[in-house]
Amino acid sequence: MHRNLILLFVMVLYYGLGTYGLVVFDAGLLVSSLVLFGIPALALARFTLAPSAVLVSIALLGGGVAILLEGIAHIYGLWYSIGIAEARLFGLIPLEMLLSTTVQVVFLGLLYEVLFDDGIYTPRSAWHRMTFFGVFSIAVLVLIGMHQYLIAGVFLTYSYLWIIGSILAAALASMALHKDFSVLFFDKVIDFSIIASVPLAISLWVSSTNVHKVFAHHTEYLATFSLFGQTVPIEEVALLFALPFFVATMYEMYLDDRA
C-alpha cells in the first residue's frame, strides 16, 4: 500500500511537470508520447523487472490496437494525425501515431501490473507469450489492408462507436469465457480503468492544445465538445476508459498469471 502511494505521488509530480513542459514548449506528437508514456513505461519495466518477452508481447498487442484505431480513423476520415514524419502504413496511418499508441498500451500493461497485480510474471515460454498477440496484430493488419484495397467502398456509420464497442466486447467475451473469471477481477479492472484514464486524459488535453490530431467528419460522432478550440468527439472520452479496460483484461487473461 505504501509503495503504491509513493508511486502515485511520483507519477502525479512527474505528469504535472511533464505536462507543463510539453504545453509551454509546444511539443510534437512523438515527444509528447515519449514523455507521457515512454519514460514512465521504461521506469515501470525496470521497477518490475519485466522480462523482455512480456514487453514484446504487450508491444505486439499495442501494435494491433494502434493499427485498428488509426486504420479505421484514416479510412473513415475520423481524424487526421499531425506529425513530423510523412511515412505512412498503407499510405494511411502515420508511423508516429502507431508508435504513440503502442507505447501507450505498453505503459498501461505495466501500470496495471504495478498498481493492481502482484508484480510477479509467470515462467511461460517467450513463444507462448508472443503468439496470441502476434496473431492479433497480423489479423488486424490484414483486416485494415483488405478494407483499404479490396472493399474500400464498404462503410459503417458511427464507425468510432463500433471500434470502442468491439474493444469492450472482446474484453467482456474474454472474461465470460475464461474459467478463472471472477467478480473481484472485474472490479479490479474497473478501478484500474478509472485510474489509467487520467494519464490518457492528460494526453488528450496535450494533443488538443498542441494540435497533434484534428477530428473531422463530425456527422459520424454521437456528440462533440470543444477543448481548447478543437472539436473532440464524445467517443474519445469513452476510449479513455475502454482502452485500459481492454488492455488489463487481455494482459491478465492471456499473458499474466490471472491472479
Image: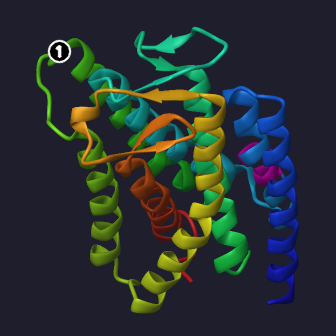
* 34 vs 143: above or below: below
Determine which quarter of the picture holds residue 86: top right
Horizontally, residue 184 falls left or right of residue 142, namely right
Residue 38 located within the stretch drawn in magenta: yes
Magenta segment boundaries in residue numbering: 37-42
Q: How many marks?
A: 1
Name, please, the residue furthest toward the left: 154
Q: Nearer the viewer, residue 53 or 153?
A: 153
* 81 vs 134: above or below: above
Q: Which residue is mark 1?
A: 150
Residue shown at 17% from the left, 15% from the top: 150
Residue 126 visible in the displayed image:
no
Q: x%, y% of residue 126?
A: 62, 52
Determine which quarter of the picture holds residue 64: top left
Q: x%, y% of residue 228?
A: 57, 39
Q: Nearer the viewer, residue 3 or 27?
A: 27
Horizontally, residue 57 falls left or right of residue 18, namely left
